[in-house]
Image: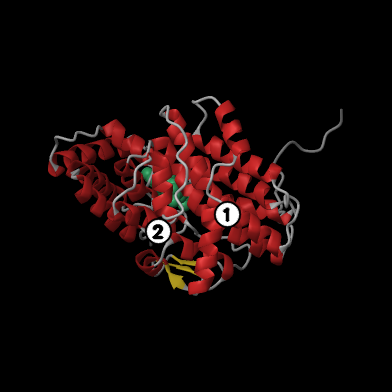
């Protein structure tokens, strides 16, 4: 096979149809089931978007009421999962905690091997409802704090923050978190979603597919980038007494130095978008509100300085992980919790793709071109 026919990283290869979302890098647009993600982020709750991704349409009032009731009923931390998390060292990476929890939830599930439409829908719903408790409790136990029980009077995002911090958050903060959850929910055939589809294509079960997807999301070239962005900010140094301009100038110098050493700076660049990530303006607006709410202009200085220096040197634009990292930091999340938040959101997209793959399945099994030793004898 000629070298030119091999598409490293499957770059540019279209492997299947999907009706879940459409990414158009030319117009910088992202549609979930036909709706622009910016509109969904402005007008919908995360629950409505989850319903949309799974069912193809937004819920009417009674459908939303039923959906919301099921989600609220499934929020408590499963005791078997709590027992397992407690057995893990405090040094376990939170993504490994999410992966392990998903695996346990699957292993204990009465419908574990049921991959019918109804079985998958029920399991997707339960996992979606259950994951905030896992993410929240893992951060709390690392801080020496106990479980916070869920609140049925709060929506998904408000309850997620409640279970994490044990305090009700003001509406602006809940809103910014809700926006991030909607923006992270779905993005066509990204690496973790493709992983979930590969596993599903073997007729394996939903929890196995999500567990594998979490493994793929963990890497810094994918979801792990939102944590890596915060490590960059920390390396440059967050100085709360500094002005926006001073912080921007230090960040520019840091970026110029990093690029001169040919470093890859996380939170920039994208395999599909080459002129900017469609989700960034919406998330940046949410970050701006959080910077104003918490009174932390120096973080905007770092943000602007890095972005400008990268643009001037390489014209590479930020991706969604760039504004979410500092947003979650401002809200009080520990950096290792950032990618697990992404998991809690992307469960919706992954499971929508799992159901779509299962409905029109073909085993995913590409070919390789052999370039090892010629045939030889012992
Ligand atoms: N920092 C510095 N340089 C970058 C860069 C970054 N974040 N992203 C891309 N580049 C450069 C590469 O070094 C390469 O330069 P070269 O041609 O001089 O070698 C060029 O841009 C093309 O990059 P490449 O990695 O081949 O593009 P890709 O489409 O395979 O990669 C990513 C896409 C996302 C893997 C890549 O941009 C990246 O590693 N970004 C950082 C990780 C990240 O933020 N991931 C989250 C994605 S949502």
Of mark 1 and mark 2, the one earlier in the sequence is 1
Residue 45 image point, x, y percent: 42, 63
Residue 115 image point, x, y percent: 73, 57
Residue 67 image point, x, y percent: 54, 64
Q: Which residue lies under the disc numbered 1? A: 193
Q: Quick check: 296 left or right of 140? A: left
Q: Quick check: 249 left or right of 11? A: left
**In the image shown, does 141 or 176 lie closer to the viewer?**
141
Q: CA distance from mark 1 to mark 2?
A: 20 Å
The quarter of the image holding the C terminus is top right
Label 2 neighbourhood size at 10 Å, few (<14), some (14-19), many (20+)?
some
Mark 2 within 8 Å of ligand 1, using the beta carbon: no
Identified at 32% across, 60% down, the residue is: 282
Label 1 neighbourhood size at 10 Å, few (<14), some (14-19), many (20+)?
many
Please tell me whether mark 1 or mark 2 is closer to you in this view. Answer: 1
Cβ–Cβ under 8 Å for marks 1 and 2: no
Q: How many marks?
A: 2
Residue 274 numbered tag: 2
Identified at 64% across, 61% down, the residue is: 121
Any part of residue 131 in sight? yes
Any part of residue 190 in sight? no
How is the structure coloured here? secondary structure
**In the image shown, does 298 or 45 lie closer to the viewer?**
45
């Amino acid at each position: 096979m000629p070298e030119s026919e091999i598409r490293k990283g499957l770059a540019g290869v279209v492997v299947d149809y999907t009706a879940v979302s459409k990414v158009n890098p030319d117009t910088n647009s992202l549609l979930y089931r036909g709706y622009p993600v910016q509109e969904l982020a402005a007008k919908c709750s995360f629950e409505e978007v989850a319903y949309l991704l799974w069912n193809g349409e937004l819920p009417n009032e009674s459908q939303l009421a039923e959906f919301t009731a099921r989600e609220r009923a499934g929020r408590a931390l499963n005791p078997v999962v709590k027992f397992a998390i407690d057995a893990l060292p405090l040094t376990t990476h939170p993504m490994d905690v999410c992966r392990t929890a998903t695996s346990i939830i699957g292993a204990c599930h009465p419908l574990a091997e049921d991959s019918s439409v109804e079985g998958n829908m029920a399991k997707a719903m339960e996992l979606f409802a259950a994951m905030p408790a896992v993410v929240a409790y893992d951060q709390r136990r690392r801080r020496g704090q106990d479980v916070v029980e869920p609140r049925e009077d709060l929506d998904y995002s408000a309850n997620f923050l409640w279970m994490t911090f044990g305090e009700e958050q003001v509406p602006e903060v809940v809103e910014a978190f809700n926006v991030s959850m909607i923006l992270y929910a779905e993005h066509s055939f990204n690496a973790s979603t493709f992983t979930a589809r590969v596993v599903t294509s073997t007729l394996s079960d939903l929890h196995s597919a999500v567990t594998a997807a979490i493994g793929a999301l963990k890497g810094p070239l994918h979801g792990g980038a939102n944590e890596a962005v915060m490590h960059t900010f920390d390396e440059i140094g967050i100085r709360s007494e500094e002005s926006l301009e001073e912080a921007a100038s230090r960040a520019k110098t840091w970026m110029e130095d990093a690029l001169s050493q040919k470093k890859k700076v996380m939170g920039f660049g994208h395999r599909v978008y080459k002129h900017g990530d469609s989700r960034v303006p919406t998330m940046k607006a949410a970050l701006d509100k959080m910077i104003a709410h918490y009174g932390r202009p120096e973080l905007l200085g770092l943000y602007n300085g890095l972005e400008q220096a990268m643009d001037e040197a390489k014209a590479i634009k930020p991706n969604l992980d760039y504004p979410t990292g500092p947003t979650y930091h401002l809200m009080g999340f520990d950096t290792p919790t950032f990618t697990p938040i992404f998991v809690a959101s992307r469960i919706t997209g992954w499971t929508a793709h799992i159901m779509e793959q299962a409905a029109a399945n073909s085993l995913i099994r590409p070919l390789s071109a052999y370039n090892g030793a010629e045939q030889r004898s012992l």
